[in-house]
Image (spheres, helix red, strand yellow):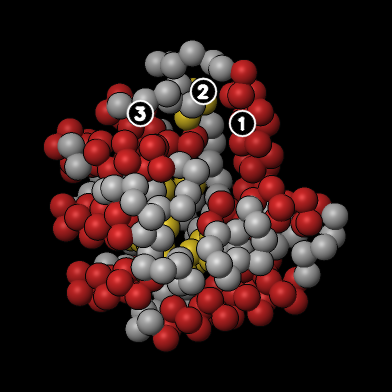
Amino acid sequence: MNIIINADDFGISAGANQAIAALHKKGVLSSATLLVDLPYAKDAAEIAKKQNLPTGLHFNLTLGPLAKYKNRADFERQLLFGQVRIKFIKEELNRQYQKMLDLGLTPTHIDSHQHVHNWPQLFPVFARFARDKKIPLRLTLEKPVFNKYDKIQTGDFKQLWRKTAALIFGGWNFLTAKLLRVQTNRSLTSLFALWPRAARPEPKHLRLLLNKLKDRAEYMCHPIANAENTPTAITETSLREYTLMTNPEFFAMISNKFHLINFGEL
């Protein structure tokens, strides 16, 4: 079975770059996506070129000094009130794509930080751009996976609502991608697909996720080797994820069942 294991947030910090490079060398990572405006983007690009690591564009509107919006909540509020201009999205997509080319990398695909491209108002913009560039686009079709190992907490119900809305959007976008003849992965999973959330992810959680994967699915991860200068709200999860992915048990899970590909091989 062919699957993609893609690391988001390449270039966000030295710790992320270190983790992604190590996991790719280990053979448990087949793809990454680059935050072109973040401080360690140039270093990440050099790693990608040195290791021949297939790397896509991690389009970003909400992180770093050049971000248009303060955070995801700010972006979503303005989007819902009609204050996000499609013209700006097109210009920003072109700018970030060109910046990646300037770093010496041709994107293998496009996805986005915090899945901003999953909103149905914006997905067609990305789909047409990907079609014109003849590269795939991430389909954020992530079904919640019931986590039988952890108890449900109050905040999990809010997360379930968000997951359900994102899944509906993903289904609509699947039809859009088909209509526009854009190549995509068939589905997506990650630690964030678990419901309820895993208080401390363990190999059993990863096995639960991997057992749900189908052909041409993407496993999305955010590994970091250390938390220094890593400006995200998921630092602890990312540190833990890196530890789990370097565990021989994870390599065994992958090698016994899957063949790793990148987006360019879809």
Q: Is residue 225 left or right of residue 238?
A: left
- Assess whether mark 3 and mark 1 are in contact (beta carbons under 8 angstroms): no
**Which residue is at the far top?**
151
One can see residue 111 in this view: yes
Residue 163 in the image: state x and y as whole percent.
Answer: 61, 36
For label 3, the residue is: 201
- Assess whether mark 2 and mark 1 are in contact (beta carbons under 8 angstroms): yes
Q: Nearer the N terminus, badge 2 or badge 3?
A: 2
**Which residue is at the far bottom?**
102
Residue 196 in the image: state x and y as whole percent.
Answer: 51, 23
Q: Nearer the N terminus, badge 1 or badge 3?
A: 1
For label 2, the residue is: 196
Q: Quadrant of residue 116?
A: bottom right
Q: Nearer the N terminus, badge 1 or badge 2?
A: 1
Residue 117 in the image: state x and y as whole percent.
Answer: 62, 59
| Amino acid on which disc 2 is placed | Pro
Q: CA distance from mark 1 to mark 3?
A: 17 Å
State the quadrant of the C terminus: bottom left
Q: Is residue 106 left or right of residue 165?
A: left
User: Judging from the image, what secondary structure is the residue with disc 1 in?
Assistant: helix
For label 1, the residue is: 159
Q: Residue at x 56, y 17 (%)?
A: 153
User: Judging from the image, what secondary structure is the residue with disc 2 in?
Assistant: loop
